[in-house]
Image (tube, grey):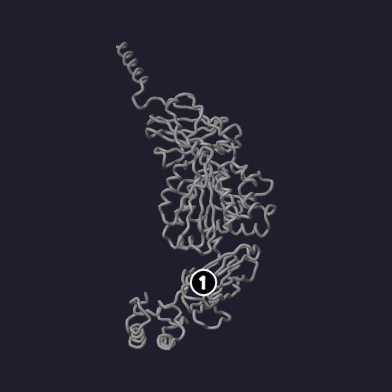
C-alpha cells in the first residue's frame, strides 16, 4: 500500500515536471524586434517567464530615450514578467506600456510597477504572439500607406522633398483644391516625428487630414481658405529603425535647424530648403506647427516668447491657443509654454521665426496619460484631429461674408446685402475694425468698420454694404461689382499689418433680375430687357439670367414671352440654366 502511494506520488511529480506542449516556459529566443520600428536589447532570463531587457540606445549621445517595441512568440497562456533595466527618468509606473495581440490594436499591459531602478510590467500572453511597446507604434510604412491612399484623391498631391541619411524618401502630402487656383488661401504646414518615438501626434495628424479632405461643409470651407502641407515623417530613418530621439547620425533634428541650411542634417535640410524656396516665391507658410509628444500628463506646447517675438505677435499666438482650448477639451492655453532664448538652440520654430517671421508653434501630446489619469488612445488622439482643424481654420480665416444670421456664404446675388463677420480675439480691446470689400471687375472698393459685437473679440455688421451689379454710381453702402466675379473682403490685423485675411464669395444674379437690382423680375427688368433687345440699350447684368426658359439660347423672343407669361399670367417658374 505504501509503495503504491509512493508510485502515485512519483507519477504525479513526473507529470508536473513535464510541461505540456504549448505551455513551455518563455525563452530568450521567443523575443523578437526584427521588424520595422523594433527596439529591444540584451534580453536575459531572470527566473521563470521573467526577463530583463534594455532599450537599444540611439547612439552614445542620447539626451532622452523611451522607445521599445518587441514581440514574444509561441507562448499562449503564459504570463510574462518584464523588467526594463535602462529606463529613462520619465519612464515610471504611471507610464504604462501597451501591448497588442495583433500588432494593430493596443491596450495597456495588465500590471506595471517600479522595481528598484527598473520599470517592471506583467502581461498574460493570450495569443501566439503578443507585441509590446512604450506607446502605440505609428510606423513609417503606416504613414506611407496612408499618404499613398490619400494621393488618389484629386484634392491631394504627394511629392518627395528629399531623402534621409539612409535614403528613405521624405514625403509631403499637399491638400489643395485646384479648382480654387487664383484665390488667396493661407498656407499651413504641419510636421511630426522629428523625434521618432513621439508617435501620438501622427494619429492626430492622420485624422486632421481625413477631416479636411472629406465632403463635409467644414472641409469644403477649410479648403476654400487653406492649403495644407504635411510632412508626417520628418525623421524617416529614426522611425523605421526604432530610434527614440535622434536621426541615424546621432543628431536631435529639432536642435539642428540653423541659419546655414547646408550645415543641417539631410532631413532638416529637405524641409528647411523647401520653406526657404516658398518664402522666396512669396508663398511663405502662414502657419507652421511641429508636432511632438512629451512625458507630461497633459497636452501643451510652445509659442514664441515675448523676448523672441513682439508683444503683438505673442498676443496673436495667444488667440490660436484660445481657439484651440475652445474646441479641444484636453487643451488649456495656460499650460502652453513660451519658447524663449534660454531654450536649446536649433529648434525649428525659433529658426523659422527668426529667419522668415513664420507663425510657428510646437505642440506636445502626452506620451501616455492625461491629468485625469485617462490614458491616451488612438481614438482620443484621432478625436483631436477635427478639433485642431477647426482651431487652425478659425485662426487663419477669421473673416466671413455671411447670411443675415452670420453663417458663412459661398455665393451672393446682385442686390443682396453683404453681412460681414470677423473674429480677432487679440483685438477685443478695440471698438471696431476696418474691412475692405473690393471688386476686381469694376475697381470699386468700399471700407466699412465692423463694430464689436461681443466682449470676446467678435465684430460683425449686418447689411454692411449692398451689392450693385448695374451701372449705378458707387456710393456709400454700395459695392459695384460684376456677375461671375469673386467679390473679396479683406482685413489687415491692425497690430500686424503684414497679416492680411481674405474672404470671398462668387457673385451671381437671380434668374430674370435683368438689371441686377436684387428685386424682381419686375417691370424695370422687363423694360431693361426690351430696350436691350430692340433698341441697343445697356446689357443685362449677365446674359445667362435672361435665358429664363432655360433652352440655352437667349435672350430671344421666346424668353420675353416666357417672362411676360410668368409675371402677368402665373406662368411656369423661370429656369435659367
Ligand atoms: Zn519631441
* Viewer-side residue, 489 vs 281: 281
The residue located at (53%, 83%) in the rendering is 472
Q: On the picture, is 135 further left or further right than 347?
A: left
Regarding residue 374, the answer to whether it shows in the image is: no
Q: Residue furthest front?
A: 536
- Report crowding for label 1: few under 14, some 14 to 19, many 20 or more residues within 10 A (C-alpha): many
Q: Is residue 486 above or below residue 386?
A: below
Q: Is mark 1 within 8 Å of ligand 1?
A: no
For the residue pair 280 and 244, the one nearer the viewer reads as: 280
Which quadrant does ligand 1 occupy? top right
Q: Is residue 146 above or below residue 31?
A: below
At x 45%, y 32%, the residue is: 34
Quadrant for residue 320, please give it: bottom right
> What percent of the width, then of the height, locates residue 572?
32, 81
Residue drawn 41% across the image and 54% down it: 153
Residue pointed to by mark 1: 487
Q: Residue furthest top?
A: 3
Dot 1: element: strand
Asked which quadrant contains residue 127, the reply is: top left
Q: In the rendered view of the protein, which quadrant contains the C terminus?
A: bottom left
**Which image quarter holds the N terminus?**
top left
Where's residue 550, x and y in %? 34, 77
Whether residue 469 is visible here, answered yes or no, is yes
Residue 449's x, y, as percent? 61, 73
Is residue 250 placed above or below 397 in the rendered structure? above
Amino acid at each position: 500500500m505504501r509503495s503504491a502511494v509512493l508510485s502515485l506520488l512519483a507519477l504525479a511529480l513526473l507529470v508536473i515536471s513535464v510541461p505540456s506542449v504549448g505551455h513551455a516556459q518563455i525563452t530568450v529566443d521567443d523575443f523578437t524586434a526584427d521588424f520595422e520600428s523594433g527596439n529591444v536589447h540584451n534580453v536575459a532570463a531572470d527566473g521563470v517567464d521573467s526577463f530583463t531587457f534594455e532599450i537599444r540606445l540611439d547612439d552614445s549621445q542620447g539626451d532622452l530615450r523611451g522607445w521599445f517595441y518587441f514581440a514574444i512568440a509561441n507562448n499562449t497562456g503564459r504570463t510574462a514578467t518584464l523588467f526594463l533595466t535602462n529606463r529613462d527618468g520619465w519612464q515610471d509606473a504611471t507610464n504604462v506600456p501597451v501591448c497588442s495581440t495583433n500588432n494593430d490594436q493596443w491596450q495597456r499591459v495588465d500590471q506595471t510597477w517600479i522595481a528598484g531602478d527598473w520599470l517592471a510590467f506583467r502581461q498574460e500572453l493570450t495569443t501566439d504572439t503578443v507585441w509590446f511597446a512604450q506607446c502605440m507604434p505609428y510606423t513609417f510604412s503606416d504613414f506611407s500607406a496612408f499618404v499613398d491612399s490619400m494621393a488618389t484623391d484629386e484634392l491631394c498631391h504627394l511629392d518627395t522633398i528629399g531623402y534621409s541619411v539612409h535614403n528613405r524618401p521624405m514625403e509631403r502630402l499637399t491638400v489643395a483644391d485646384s479648382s480654387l487656383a487664383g484665390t488667396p488661401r493661407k498656407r499651413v504646414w504641419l510636421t511630426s516625428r522629428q523625434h521618432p518615438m513621439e508617435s501620438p501626434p501622427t494619429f492626430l495628424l492622420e485624422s486632421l487630414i481625413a477631416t479636411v479632405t472629406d465632403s463635409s461643409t467644414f472641409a469644403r470651407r477649410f479648403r476654400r481658405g487653406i492649403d495644407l502641407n504635411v510632412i508626417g515623417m520628418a525623421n524617416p530613418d529614426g522611425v523605421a529603425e526604432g530610434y527614440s530621439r535622434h536621426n541615424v547620425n546621432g543628431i536631435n533634428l529639432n536642435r539642428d535647424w540653423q541659419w546655414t541650411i547646408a550645415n543641417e542634417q539631410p532631413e532638416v535640410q529637405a524641409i528647411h530648403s523647401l520653406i526657404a524656396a516658398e518664402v522666396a516665391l512669396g508663398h511663405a507658410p502662414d502657419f507652421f506647427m511641429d508636432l511632438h509628444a512629451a512625458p507630461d500628463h497633459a497636452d501643451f506646447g510652445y509659442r514664441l516668447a515675448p523676448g523672441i517675438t513682439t508683444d503683438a505677435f505673442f498676443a496673436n499666438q495667444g488667440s490660436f491657443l484660445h481657439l484651440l482650448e475652445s474646441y479641444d477639451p484636453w487643451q488649456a492655453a495656460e499650460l502652453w509654454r513660451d519658447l524663449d532664448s534660454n531654450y536649446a538652440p536649433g529648434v525649428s520654430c525659433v529658426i523659422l521665426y527668426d529667419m522668415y517671421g513664420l507663425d510657428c508653434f510646437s505642440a506636445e501630446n502626452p506620451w501616455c496619460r492625461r491629468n485625469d489619469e485617462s490614458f491616451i488612445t488612438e481614438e482620443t488622439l484621432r478625436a483631436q484631429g477635427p478639433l485642431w482643424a477647426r482651431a487652425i481654420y478659425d485662426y487663419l480665416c477669421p473673416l466671413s461674408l455671411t447670411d443675415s444670421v452670420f453663417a458663412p456664404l459661398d455665393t451672393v446675388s446682385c442686390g443682396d446685402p453683404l453681412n460681414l463677420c470677423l473674429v480677432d480675439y487679440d483685438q477685443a480691446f478695440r471698438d471696431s475694425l476696418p474691412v475692405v470689400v473690393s471688386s476686381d471687375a469694376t475697381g470699386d472698393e468700399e471700407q466699412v468698420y465692423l463694430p464689436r459685437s461681443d466682449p470676446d473679440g467678435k465684430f460683425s455688421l449686418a447689411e454692411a454694404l449692398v451689392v450693385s451689379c448695374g451701372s449705378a454710381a458707387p456710393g456709400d453702402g454700395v459695392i459695384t461689382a460684376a456677375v461671375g466675379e469673386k467679390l473679396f473682403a479683406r482685413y489687415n490685423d491692425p497690430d500686424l499689418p503684414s497679416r492680411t485675411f481674405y474672404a470671398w464669395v462668387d457673385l451671381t444674379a437671380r434668374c430674370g433680375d435683368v438689371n441686377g437690382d436684387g428685386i424682381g423680375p419686375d417691370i424695370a427688368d422687363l423694360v431693361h430687357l426690351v430696350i436691350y433687345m430692340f433698341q441697343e440699350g445697356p446689357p443685362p447684368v449677365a446674359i445667362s439670367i435672361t435665358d429664363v426658359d432655360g433652352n440655352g439660347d437667349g435672350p430671344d423672343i421666346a424668353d420675353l414671352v416666357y417672362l411676360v407669361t410668368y409675371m402677368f399670367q402665373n406662368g411656369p417658374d423661370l429656369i435659367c440654366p
